[in-house]
Structures are given as C-alpha cells and as structure tokens.
C-alpha cells in the first residue's frame, strides 16, 4: 500500500535527523551487521557531513515525510550519481523510495543531466534499482566495510 509522501529540499537543520535515519538503516550497506570496518561510511553520514552535502551546490538532497515523520532521504551528487537513497524500515515497500527517486531524477534532468545516472547499490537493494531501470555494471565490491554493486541508468 502506497503512502502519501510530502517531499521537500533538505535544510542544514535536518542534518541530525537525516544522519539518524541513514545510520539506522546502515546494516543493509555494511558487510558486518554491527558496522565493523565501516568507519569511513559512518564518517560520511555524520550530522556534520550531511550538513555539508545539503549546503553544497553539487548535491540535490531531498526528504520525504509521511505526516510529520521523516520517512526517507535521497541525494544526487554532481547531477548524475545517486549518492543516498534510504527509507526508514517502517516505511519500506510502500512507494517512498520510488517517489523520492522520481523527484530527484527529475530535478537532475532539469539541471541538464542527459548522460544517465550511476549508483553503488547495496546488494539487498538491487531489485529496487533494477525496477528503476538501472543495470548492473560490475561485480559486487567490498571495501571499507561496505558492500555494493555498481549500476548505471542510461540517459
């Protein structure tokens, strides 16, 4: 069942909540469920790091809310790399990731992206990205405590 999601641009004041949401879902990205060895990833999603992305002209950073609760986040770096797409566990499989991606993709295309998109997909998220039209570009990579599969969405 889809939920109504309200999408807006992220603000620096949102960084703490964004960081908490991502860290709460990090077990899907890390090789070890306890996050062992993934310190570079966790350093990249601190409130301070998130505030930097939100204020950077290189990022499109959007939030999705259900009622007043942060349900998901999406970020596109340099207009072509899907950098973050996280949905809180209680809101997964309800259309929020699709809504967030559609809005972020449209903003990137409006800004001039004609070459397509890339993503380093968490292995468990491959079916979601394949539904979005992404194609696997290589083998599973494990580095710095995280696992991902490189994917591309042709332009």
Image (cartoon, rainbow, N blue to C red):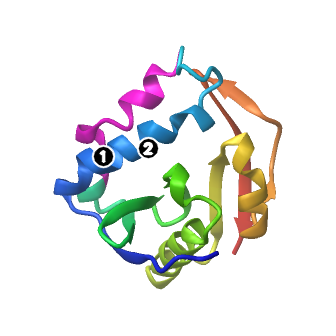
Q: In the rendering, at what x and y percent does residue 118 appear? A: 64, 57
For label 2, count other residues whose C-alpha is less than 10 Å away and answer few (under 14), some (14-19) or many (20+).
many
Pick the front one: 143 or 7 = 7
Q: Earlier in the sequence, mark 2 or mark 1?
A: 2
- From this view, report whether residue 57 is shown above or below residue 106: above
Query: Residues under labels 2 and 1: Cα distance?
Result: 10 Å
Res. 101 visible in picture: yes
Residue 85 visible (yes or no): no
Is 104 or 115 nearer to us in this picture?
Answer: 104
- Can you say which quadrant of the picture contains the C terminus? bottom right
State which quadrant residue 128 falls in. bottom right
**Mark number displayed over residue 22:** 2
Q: Which region of the structure is painted magenta?
A: 37-53
Q: Find the residue positioned furthest to the left.
A: 13
Q: Residue at x 60, y 78 (%)?
A: 114
Where residue 145 appears, as percent x and y from the top left, is 59, 21
Q: Which residue is mark 1?
A: 50
- Answer with left or right where residue 126 lies relative to residue 57: right
The question of residue 71 being in magenta is answered with no
Residue 53 or residue 125, whichever sits in front: 125
Q: Is residue 36 above or below residue 127?
A: above
Q: Image height check: is 7 above or below 144?
A: below
Dividing the picture into quarters, in which one does residue 132 lie? bottom right
| Coordinates of residue 34 in the picture (x, y in percent) | 54, 19
Of tags 2 and 1, the one toward the viewer is 2
Point out the residue furthest to the bottom here: 110
Q: Quadrant of residue 58?
A: bottom left
């Amino acid at each position: 069942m889809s939920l109504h999601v309200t999408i807006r641009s992220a603000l620096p004041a949102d960084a703490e909540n964004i960081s908490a949401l991502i860290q709460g879902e990090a077990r899907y990205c890390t090789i070890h469920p306890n996050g062992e060895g993934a310190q570079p990833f966790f350093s990249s999603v601190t409130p301070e790091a998130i505030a930097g992305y939100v204020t950077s002209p290189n990022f499109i950073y959007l939030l999705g809310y259900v009622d007043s609760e942060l349900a998901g986040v999406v970020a596109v770096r340099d207009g072509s790399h899907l950098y973050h797409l996280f949905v809180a566990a209680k809101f997964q499989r309800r259309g929020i990731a699709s809504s967030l991606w559609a809005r972020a993709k449209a903003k990137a295309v409006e800004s001039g992206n004609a070459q397509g998109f890339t993503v380093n997909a968490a292995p468990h998220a491959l079916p979601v990205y394949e539904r979005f039209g992404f194609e696997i570009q290589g083998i599973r990579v494990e580095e710095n405590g995280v696992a991902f599969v490189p994917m591309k969405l042709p332009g």
